[in-house]
Image (cartoon, rainbow, N blue to C red):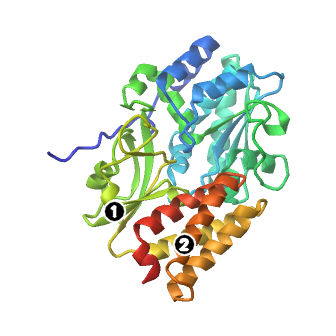
Amino acid sequence: MGKKQLRRVDLIFANDDDYLQILKKSLDIPTEEIINEMINSGLKGRGGAGFPTGLKWKLTGESKGKQKYIICNADEGEPGTFKDREILTQVPYKVLTGMAVAAKVAGATKGYIYLRGEYRFLVPLLNKEIEKFHVLCKDAGLDFKVEIFLGSGAYICGEESALMESMEGKRGEPRNKPPYPTEVGYMGKPTVINNVETLAHTFTILKYGAKKFRDLGVQDSRGSKLFSVSGDTPIPGIYELELGMTVQDFVDDFSDGDCKAVQVGGASGFLVPRKRFAETNIGYQGKLTGISLPTGGSMMLFNSSRSMFNVLDNYLDFFQEESCGQCTPCRVGCQQLVKGIEAVKRGDKPASYLDKLLKLTDTMKYTAKCGLGQSVANSFQSIVENFREEMIY
């Protein structure tokens, strides 16, 4: 069997001179038709959670209350992810168009771009685009204003409810769910929160139609996806690929020829060893055989020269630093995992202690309040279970 060639796509970064026409045309489409088009496209949130975008807009629109909000989550803090920065640099108008159409569906008059603090350098460029955007919205008869809100570098604020807490001037800590943002969001009002890439894909669907987008990908993973490729690869960078590939397909195109593992989804994602490449799919295709892993876009390749102990130690140090400390499972759990693997490596604890740490991550997965504490188990378990010998010797 020959090598499968990955299908590369050029939709998000394509230059669209007809931007104004697409915006006006989209705002003229009846709300119900927009919702149906988004749902039929199969677009799911590209931040990693994978919630259907059209359904989120619909639920917010059906929520009671006159004041509603649209928030673009540009707090790109996941290690190994750098795609949203490029979208906002190269095609910010696509993101703004997506926000405008979401505002029409939801009935919102106010929008925010929650921008990662380290991306402050983008503010002049974005403000310039927003000024032009406001004129276009006015010409199109849409009462919708967008502002930039700068974060302060907290990883936890990438979680939607912690993001809203920080916007309200509070400590960036996750809220209990339910209620969900579609009912009780920013300032207690119904709110749509979408990732930068999700909104950019909205522009593609509005321009070409749901069918063209749905024809890309497979089953429950429709469309294309931006991947931030880094690590041991001769061609690092940002690539738009059709969903539905296996990790083996990806490695065949991007590795340096000596890839022993791929971290899918950043530090909070899963590490896939070489023996699992062929059976692991990238996306949400739960009906396919094998394993299916969603990702916000980070794909880090590791070759044989890399110590997986050092990789895990680095991840855990990051989580320990970024934990908001609100809940005990995450606050204490992250600290104990770091101390635990380092004690095993030094020989202060027996190798069997790793099994106790694995049980601890199970506890964190089910009892931590938000995705940060819950996802620590992903990288810990996948690395320890597949590279146990590197944790010991």
**Circle 1 — which element?**
loop
Placement of the N terminus among the 4 image quadrants = top left
**Residue 376: image location, x then y, percent:** 59, 61
Q: Is residue 38 above or below residue 299?
A: above
Disc assigned to residue 213:
none
Q: Is residue 379 left or right of residue 56?
A: left
In the foreground, 129 or 318:
318
The quadrant in which residue 111 appears is top right
Label 2 near label 1: C-beta < 8 Å? Answer: no
User: Nearer the N terminus, badge 1 or badge 2?
Assistant: 1
**Residue 192: image location, x then y, percent:** 69, 32
Disc assigned to residue 314:
2
In the foreground, 43 or 358:
358
How many dots with numbers? 2
**Visible in this render: residue 353?**
yes
Rate crowding at label 1 as few (under 14), some (14 to 19) or many (20 or more) other CA atoms within 10 Å.
many
**Residue 23: image location, x then y, percent:** 57, 22
- Say which residue label 1 marks: 233
Under mark 2, the amino acid is Asn
Residue in the picture at 41% in, 20% down: 211
Residue in the picture at 50% in, 33% down: 201
Rate crowding at label 2 as few (under 14), some (14 to 19) or many (20 or more) other CA atoms within 10 Å.
some
Q: Is residue 5 above or below residue 300?
A: above
Spot the residue most to the left. 1
**Circle 2 — which element?**
helix
Separation (CA) of disc 1 from disc 2: 20 Å
Q: Viewer-nearest of labels 1 and 2?
A: 2
**Residue 226: image location, x then y, percent:** 45, 44
Q: Is residue 297 above or below residue 26?
A: below
Under mark 1, the amino acid is Thr
